[in-house]
């Protein structure tokens, strides 16, 4: 008997069918006969939403009336993925949905497919935020996700005939969007510009212009907790929609100018910031959502109070700053407390530092935001004053802690000189209670390198919370076959809310019957992916080859180029007979990656991958042995299809550069083995699954540092390994550019002369470990045994565990009573 703890549907199939019909009729005005898949999708979503509303209301009521501190997760990104099936899972309505939709004459898959994925994030950071709000709700912790409802999400990626990335706008709101509830009655005014004047001895900010921040609320259902939290995404609207006078002078464009300017704030995710205007727009976005959120929290927790006692604010809500984007919230809360509510500096600082905490997500110094003080002064003059004052107070405090003047100088929040800069990571560290990294190694490097001075003087502020992923979306929804097998193996489905239970699968790795079933699941997933790929992208992937995947943002430090060089070397070896064709283990390699639109080297790498794929896939000499596919526009949906089908996952960043990684966790939990470096969360994954069940290669952090110090010469490695030389020479010779020798010259030149991320230094180890990988893969039982041990031992990487760590180490709160 299998214990079933999954939620039970609140409706029968018949009832749900009727509810869909009702929505079709009253909300959409179409008959059942007229309804398209997209209509059914909207109607079903609206019907599902209604089942969440009561819990949503009680959760909010209990949050405001109770004594449990809430969490406000401030994030510029929430990469939610599709909503419908997630809501159905949490309500226990997956089967009722399928049956109702069929009863209405539609294919459930096509209905689900008509949902357009909101791409309100770039990658790991945004997806982590989405996993975290899922876990907060599932643990019953009252929480708000606060962010921006960008009108255009991350660009839609296409490839042109030459294999280059082309970016298209992602107008995800072009169709009806049933999940967001726009609430004009709860809007906030957010102001910019102007000047600060003194009135009666008080500083008064006289802004020049304001926009209206209108909340769009998304319900965030918890799994089994009966709780529904809120993701509140702000949309920018103008207060002066339209200038009738100007319009009547036939100056139609200028008549809507204020509207356009205001709405630009929530127009796109990460506007290009190489121009001053672009920089300003980014700062506008950051201030916009953070200011609206802080005022919103005061409204929610002190309803109807003119003079609330805000010394209790840190007991009502704790704000987590997801990276540096929301850090302007620190001076904003200071301003609100001092200017709007009349608190003195010390009281305001005490409240502020107790309210905020900061998560750092990077090790690349260039990714820590620094704003020119001049820009802040123009856009937010009062905030610049406050930041300068914070800086002064902070320097005073440091003088009490150390006599080391150089150190004090290094720690300035605002730099000296005639173009002073504001270091947002330093402001966040000074202005909050805790700072955390996102994996053990990352948190250690933050303390030892990136924020060393701070950690020396404020050691207690620093802590670690290793990232995690939600098993609901990334196992249960993405991989129903494996989910069923896990439930069968454990005799319960409780693992979905207590992922450590996966440990119970360890003994089953030695049970031939279970191993066989596991192999069948993986194969079925591969077949399913091959069908999906054929249908959606038009390529054929052979499920009887090894599925080997590298999906993540394209960045030099992540080293897609290491993978592509090894792949070319392998291709060359087969072609020139260095390896006997019969000894080649058939492999299909999948890439998925978007490059930042202004990132030249990354875009060139994309072009190279596409052209290697073109050449390899069309070469009869390697047919059946090696294939490369690069489906465009990698997103959450594609992840949910590809991860369950993958057998070998690539996590091959240069050691010391990937803060954590979360893809690595999703793959291991879905039974892929990892080939990876000792970087980010790989280190912990390897510890959990055991060194024997992880393909480790490459330089360590210390070795990387040594090599930088000694002077790194990539050309030496090129000369030393003929496989590497061959691969680079083929690229130079134009093998992947129709004979043109210039196309990839910038990549080649960089590899041979700079290679900052030491791709060449790690090549030999990476190429060599492929033999081990292939030997193991030939013994399918041994491979699957290890894959099962990966699933069984990675329950730690549930985002539920991450949230529990945040609750204990940083937030000091818990579930609603
Ligand atoms: C890191 O690069 C990490 C995620 C989530 C990314 C990645 O290693 O898993 O954050 N950082 O913590 C990022 O996007 C802007 O910085």
Image (spheres, rainbow, N blue to C red):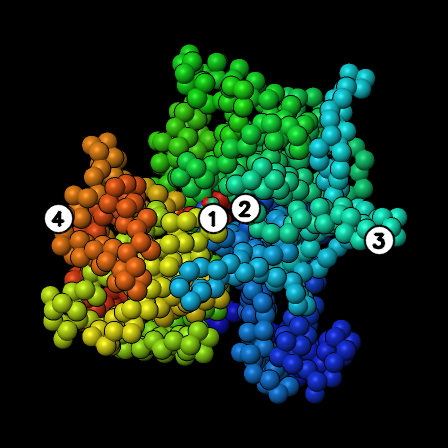
State how far apart marks 1 and 4 are (Cα).
Answer: 34 Å
Q: What residue is shown with label 4?
A: 720
Give above or below for 56 relative to 761: below
Q: Earlier in the sequence, mark 3 or mark 4?
A: 3
Residue at image coords 61%, 63%: 172
Residue at image coords 21%, 66%: 571
State how far apart marks 3 and 1 are (Cα).
Answer: 38 Å
Give above or below for 307 relative to 67: above
Q: Position of residue 798 (x, y in %)?
A: 43, 56
Q: Position of residue 287 (x, y in %)?
A: 64, 39
Between circles 3 and 2, the one closer to the viewer is: 3
Q: Is residue 359 left or right of residue 666?
A: right
Q: Nearer the viewer, residue 462 or 217?
A: 217
Q: Is residue 674 left or right of residue 465?
A: left
Find out whether the residues at labels 3 and 4 contact each other: C-beta distance under 8 Å: no
Find out whether the residues at labels 1 and 4 contact each other: C-beta distance under 8 Å: no
Q: Which mark, by number, is residue 250?
A: 3
Residue 703 visible in this rendered orientation of the protein: yes
């Amino acid at each position: 008997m299998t214990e079933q703890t999954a939620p039970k549907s609140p409706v029968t199939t018949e009832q749900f069918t009727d509810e869909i019909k009702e929505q079709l009729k009253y909300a959409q005005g179409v008959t059942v006969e007229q309804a398209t898949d997209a209509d059914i999708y909207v109607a079903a979503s609206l019907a599902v939403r209604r089942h969440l509303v009561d819990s949503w209301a009680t959760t909010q009521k209990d949050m405001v009336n109770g004594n449990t501190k809430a969490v406000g997760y401030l994030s510029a990104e929430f990469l939610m993925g599709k909503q419908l099936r997630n809501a159905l899972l949490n309500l226990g309505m997956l089967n009722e949905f399928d049956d109702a939709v069929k009863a209405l004459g539609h294919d459930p898959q096509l209905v689900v497919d008509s949902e357009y994925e909101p791409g309100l994030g770039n990658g790991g950071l945004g997806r982590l935020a989405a996993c975290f709000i899922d876990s907060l709700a599932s643990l019953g912790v009252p929480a708000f996700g606060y962010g921006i409802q960008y009108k255009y999400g991350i660009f839609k990626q296409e490839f042109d005939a030459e294999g280059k990335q082309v970016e298209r706008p992602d107008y995800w709101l072009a169709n009806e969007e049933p999940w967001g509830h726009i609430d004009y009655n709860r809007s906030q005014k957010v102001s910019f510009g102007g000047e600060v004047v003194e009135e009666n001895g008080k500083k008064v900010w006289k802004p020049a212009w304001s926009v209206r921040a209108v909340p769009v609320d998304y319900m965030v259902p918890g799994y089994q907790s009966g709780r529904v939290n809120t993701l509140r995404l702000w949309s920018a609207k103008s207060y002066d929609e339209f200038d009738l006078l100007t319009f009547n002078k036939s100056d139609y464009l200028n008549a809507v100018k204020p509207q356009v300017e205001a709405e630009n704030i929530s127009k796109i995710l990460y506007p290009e910031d190489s121009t001053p205007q672009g920089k300003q727009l980014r700062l506008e976005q950051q201030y916009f959502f953070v200011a609206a959120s802080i005022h919103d929290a005061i409204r929610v927790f002190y309803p109807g109070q003119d003079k609330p006692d805000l010394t209790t604010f840190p007991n009502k809500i704790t704000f987590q700053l997801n990276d540096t984007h929301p850090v302007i919230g620190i001076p904003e809360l200071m301003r609100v407390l001092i200017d709007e509510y009349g608190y003195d500096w010390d009281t305001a600082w005490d409240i502020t530092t107790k309210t905020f905490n900061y998560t750092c997500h990077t090790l690349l110094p260039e990714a820590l935001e620094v704003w020119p003080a001049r820009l802040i002064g123009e856009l937010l003059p009062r905030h610049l004053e406050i930041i300068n004052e914070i800086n002064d107070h902070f320097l005073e405090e440091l003088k009490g802690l150390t006599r080391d003047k150089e150190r004090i100088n290094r720690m300035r929040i605002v730099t000296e000189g005639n173009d002073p800069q504001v270091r947002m990571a330093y402001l966040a560290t000074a202005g909050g209670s805790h700072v955390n990294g996102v994996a053990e190694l990352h948190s250690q490097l933050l303390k030892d390198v990136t924020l060393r001075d701070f950690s020396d003087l404020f050691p207690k502020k620093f802590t670690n919370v290793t990232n995690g992923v939600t098993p609901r979306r990334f196992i249960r929804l993405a991989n129903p076959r494996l989910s069923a097998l896990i439930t069968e193996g454990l005799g319960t489905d409780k693992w979905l809310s207590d992922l450590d239970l996966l440990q119970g699968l360890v003994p089953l790795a030695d049970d031939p019957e279970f191993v066989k079933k596991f192999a069948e699941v993986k194969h079925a997933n591969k077949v399913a992916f091959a069908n999906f790929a054929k249908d959606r992208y038009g390529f054929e992937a052979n499920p009887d080859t090894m599925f080997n995947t590298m999906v993540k943002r394209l960045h030099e430090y992540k080293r897609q180029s290491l993978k592509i060089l090894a792949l070319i070397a392998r291709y060359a070896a087969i072609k020139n007979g260095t390896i006997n064709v019969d000894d080649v283990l058939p492999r299909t390699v999948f890439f998925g990656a978007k490059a930042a639109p202004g990132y030249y080297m990354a875009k060139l790498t994309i072009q190279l991958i596409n052209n290697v794929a073109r050449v390899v896939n069309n070469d009869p000499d390697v047919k059946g042995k090696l294939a490369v596919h690069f489906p465009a526009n990698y997103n959450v949906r594609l992840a949910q299809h590809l991860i369950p089908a993958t057998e070998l996952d690539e996590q091959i960043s240069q050691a010391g550069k990937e803060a954590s990684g979360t893809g690595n966790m999703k793959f291991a939990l879905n039974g892929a083995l990892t080939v990876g470096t000792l970087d980010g969360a790989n280190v912990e994954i390897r510890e959990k699954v055991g060194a024997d069940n992880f393909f480790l290669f490459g330089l360590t952090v210390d070795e990387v540092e040594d090599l930088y110090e000694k002077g790194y010469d990539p050309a030496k490695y090129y000369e030393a390994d003929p496989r590497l030389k061959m691969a680079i020479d083929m690229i130079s010779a134009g093998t992947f550019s129709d004979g043109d020798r210039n196309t990839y010259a910038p990549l080649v030149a960089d590899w041979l002369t700079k290679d900052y991320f030491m791709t060449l230094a790690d090549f030999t180890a990476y190429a060599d470990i492929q033999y081990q990988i292939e030997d193991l893969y030939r013994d399918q039982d041994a491979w699957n045994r290890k894959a099962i041990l990966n699933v069984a031992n990675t329950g730690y990487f549930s985002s539920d565990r991450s949230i529990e760590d945040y609750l204990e180490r940083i937030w000091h709160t818990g579930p609603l009573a």
